[in-house]
Image (spheres, helix red, strand yellow):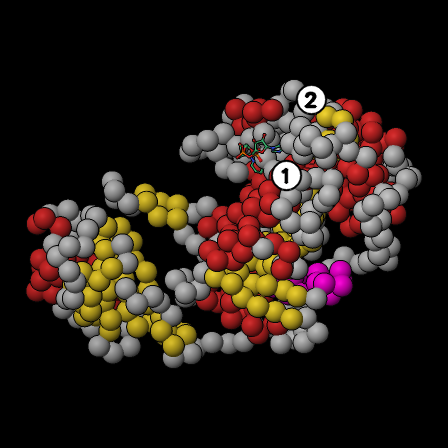
Amino acid sequence: MNTNKITIAYGDGIGPEIMQSTIEILNAAGADLEYDVIEIGEKVYLSGSKFGISDSDWKTLENNKIFLKAPITTPQGGGYQSLNVAIRKTLGLLANVRPCISYAPFVDTNFANINLVIVRENEEDLYAGIEHQQTDEVVQCLKLVSVQGSEKIIRYAFEYAKAHNRQHVTCMSKDNIMKLTDGMFHKMFNKIALEYPEISTDHYIIDIGAAKLASDPERFDVVVTLNLYGDIISDIAADVAGSVGLGGSSNVGENFAMFEAIHGSAPDIAGKDIANPSGLINGACMMLVQMGKASIAEKIQNALLKTLEDGIHTGDIYKLGLSKEKVGTKAFTQALIERLGQLPSTFKPVHLNHDAKPIVIKTEPKKPIVKKLVGTDVFIDWSEDNRSGRLLGEKISQFMTGNLQLSKISNRGVEVYPAGHSSTFCTNHWSCRFVGKELCEPKDIILLLQQFEALGLEVIKTENLYTMDGQAAFSAA
Ligand code: NAD
């Protein structure tokens, strides 16, 4: 493998402009890289590819192991799969690391001392993108969270904190509501935190955590969270720091890594030579560190700081009184190149660890768990009898025989039978919970489904109910 060869993609919208800028800077700084250019994004989608990348370009990506990517536009609506998500999941890019720094006093922000890093789980959660329309009224999206995925990202966050001399790791989740998925993530965080006594920790419910990131971002150091929350809070943090145009990001796995800006393809400003290339430049610097070229990354980051402190600003960060010159993408690039080799005088110069090793995650072997089938939730599409949970309950209980007994019916997570309120709004999507009088077997469920069919009730899906080590492993309603 040629360790200087990387894959690049110019992407969509402002992508080509900011990639051109970044490549010019990398070359001028002496990064000594060879580029394999691949075509991804909107054009490829619209030419008929469901994934926005051709097979041969996918091979190039796999061969080179390092990918510097400009943002792409995912066409809206069904039929197209997000290439970003596909790359992250297929190549096992488990951690999305998004540093967020304020550049005060030269870039306007209410918070002069933001210096935080968001470590976002990158492969699971709602981004598995598993969606089904189950009735003409109800659509579902599956939120999948694994023990391994949670362990890896949380260990990554602590190892990252250790490697970068950071003192504090915050976990954000919504485990007051999603007690199993987010609950597992939070419990894993508490468990792994014990292995790092030198690092202090805390936990925020994501809603107040996001609010604190917006109102008091300087209190945060490293934040680890699930995929969707991480995506949202990193845009909040970047915007609060000054501009989404400034943030870079790495997506790292065991064998591959992808580097990009945190922002999207900004079609509203594409082709106008006004985009801020700093996000992709910062992403490229993270790439250089990963490739063992920290001295080049340092040179570029110091030139970027010097450019910012000289008041040479693109439109997104330009402010009268703070900025000296409003420039376009090309002029910003030239200004930065002219400053390669210089250090900032007000900002603290960047000193990177030149011997830093890529973070390697060692996970614990899985412990055996006693898993027992104790029942099933049968989901049905049913609109008759004014949608009364009571009538549906009576209809089902009257005919069902066998080990599995109806224990309750719920609608959108609210119990409507045998308890329930007449004011609860019901859709045509019902969950009928059956629990075994004694331990269940799969054949009990098959028998139950045959009884549903005999009753003329349309089963949409079933979810088995298990206990894990004796604990109920399913939600209450
Ligand atoms: P966006 O990040 O592209 O733009 C949001 C706002 O920020 C816009 O007003 C834009 O002009 C501004 N902005 C973004 N980057 C800037 C920069 N470098 N300089 C100056 N201003 C900048 O978000 P969006 O509009 O929601 O998404 C546009 C497209 O990008 C969508 O198709 C979306 O799917 C895609 N997207 C791609 C990625 C990626 O490839 N990694 C990430 C996010 C969104």
Q: How many marks?
A: 2
The residue tagged with tag 2: helix, strand or loop?
loop
- Mark 1 or mark 2, earlier in chain: 1
Mark 1 surroundings: few (<14), some (14-19) or many (≥20) residues within 10 A: many
Residue bounds of the magenta highlight: 154-166
Residue 149 location in percent, x, y? 56, 60
User: Disc 1 residue type?
Assistant: Ser
Q: Quadrant of the N terminus?
A: top right
Q: Is residue 436 above or below residue 91?
A: below
Q: CA distance from mark 1 to mark 2?
A: 17 Å
Judge by depth and name the residue closer to the eye, 322 or 28: 322
Q: Is residue 448 left or right of residue 356?
A: left
Within the image, what quadrant is residue 339 found in? top right
Within the image, what quadrant is residue 275 found in? top right
Ligand 1 within 8 angstroms of badge 2 C-beta? no
User: Disc 2 residue type?
Assistant: Asp
Residue for point 8% across, 49% down:
385
Q: Is residue 458 left or right of residue 79?
A: left
Residue for point 19% across, 51% down:
425
Within the image, what quadrant is residue 57 found in? top right
Mark 2 surroundings: few (<14), some (14-19) or many (≥20) residues within 10 A: some
